[in-house]
Amino acid sequence: MKRRNAVAVTAGVCLLFAVFFIYPALAVVGEAFRDRDGGFTFAFVVEVFRNPVYVEGLWNALLLGVTSTFVTLLIAFPLALLSHRYDFFGRRILGGLILIPLVLPPFVGAIGVMHILSVTGSLNSLLIEIGLMDPGQRIDWLAEGRFWGIVVMNALHLYPILYMNIAASLSSLDPAMEQAAENLGCRPSRRLFRITLPLAMPGIFAGSSIVFIWSFTELGVPLVFNYSRVAPVQVFHGIKDLGGNPAPYALVAVILLISALVFGLTKFLFGRSTSGSQPRPKGRDAEKKLTGLNSLGCAMIFAGVFLVASIPHAGVVMLAFSDNWYDSIAPVHWTIGHFQEALGDPLVVPSIENSLFYAVVATLIAVIVGLAIAWVVVRSDIKGRSVLDALVMLPLAVPGLVLAFGYLALSQEGKPLHFMIGAGGSPALLLIAAYAVRRMPYVVRAAVAGLQQSNPAMEEAARSLGAGTWRTLRRISIPLIGANVAAGAILAFAFAMLEVSDSLILAQQAQHYPITKAIYTLLSTLGNGHELAAALGTWAMVFLGIAIVGATALGGKKGGLFKL
């Protein structure tokens, strides 16, 4: 009976992912290679590489991905190494503060950064105040620096993900290997490059692949910075002529191919690596207790990164409370009126209601399906369960831009998923499906971790007393892993509430906008649109912050919820 249930769950999940994940992704690829008569052609993809505008967009997207990943690694690796090797003042608290950047979608943080770096923004005002800039020769930091502005925004938002992957990899290393090298006279720098770094490579490459794919396909930040010469923005603008222009399909196909190559290369090189994943022997501790200036120095490094990473958040909050912030370091006058006005805007309250509905339903689906998947992966012995586990992780490797574009293309009149468009053109079912599929890995990873840590003997005892599979799952398994499931569900819900790519592409009518689409629309509103968007972004920041803290407290095992 147990085996039959596992096979049924596996078949159901494979069917679900085939329809709502693999099919939309492959459909985009298919359209890129299908001519107007239905035949096969390379012409559209070739045309992408012949068009200098599209080539520049792809090249800029690749540069953004590579550069953002490199800068993120420069931030995350030293922090993870310090946390792994040393016990210093405030390490636990400062390690928690490192997660702060995750509480704000980068494209919302870009609103605050734009205000700080504008010609009349805080940075120029500060430089003028201390005498380092002539008031008549102000610098427009974003005029030629949009590329680097996007890189910085990506790095400051994504370094916690890479930090947690590297920290998880380092924490599983056997400290005896480093101690043996030290006893043989190996210098610290040589020990780092010959022992620690190679053993940590699985975590480094796993986290780096997530950062690269995220940065390579980032849509929100380039839109806010008005950086149109990048492939994701070109795809977004191509939606307006989706029926008559095959170029967006070809662009998305190329984006998917590059992302798949990066993911596949990472899994091929490090997916089966075990050198860095052996459990740390009990009783051995590689941490060195620091005191005095050394301890304070490590703490200051963590605190400095936290303060720099908090600049976008501070900019958004100050903009939301500002009544007069022009040509000054900080707002001259403060007000809470923007929060009240935002709640009175016809876009805001409906968008909150829409996002709550989409995210709640998507999270319920993710929890139900994710629990079933975790049970098959951990508790069953059927062949192919490792393939099922890998399949569920694929949404982390496939850009949200690709999936959203596939849903949009397949939901047009006469297409297979057109039935998912509700009354009045509502994209609710599309958004729910996209949110559920893309955030399901968080639930699965959390549930798998919980089941691996729980004792299966209790479940076996329940079955021996006559309890069926589903009763055992409901009365024994789920209560045992409740904290883990809650942690994954909270993360899935929070990130679904603030999803960017799916929301910007699939929601085309104001009455169906989720929160992120409402924020983007408010940015183009004349008058105090930026202030209203910042106010709504501040609400979102507070909400997501509470969710991440709750998820970490309940079951956020170091790096586990974000590992690839």
Image (tube, rainbow, N blue to C red):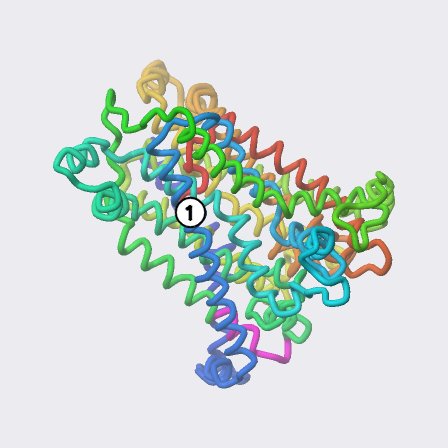
Q: Is residue 378 left or right of residue 244?
A: left
Q: Residue furthest front?
A: 131
Based on the picture, tell me whether residue 244 belongs to the magenta stretch: yes
Q: Quadrant of the N terminus?
A: top left
Q: Residues within 10 Å of mark 1 (few under 14, many from 20)?
A: many
Q: Residue furthest left?
A: 184
- Label 1 belongs to which residue? 392
Whether residue 367 can be seen here? no
Residue at (79%, 50%) from the top-left corner?
Answer: 531
Residue at (44%, 81%) from the top-left corner?
Answer: 40
Residue at (59%, 73%) from the top-left corner?
Answer: 229
Q: Which residues are magenta?
A: 243-253
Above or below for 490 versus 49: above
Q: Is residue 430 left or right of residue 341?
A: left
Q: Nearer the viewer, residue 340 or 133?
A: 133
Q: Position of residue 286 (x, y in %)?
A: 28, 28
Above or below for 266 versus 283: below
Whether residue 61 can be seen here? yes
- Rendered image quadrant of residue 287: top left
Q: Secondary structure at mark 1?
A: helix
Above or below for 388 versus 268: above
Q: Position of residue 72 (x, y in %)?
A: 46, 51
Task: Please state which amino acid type lies under the numbered disc 1.
Answer: Val
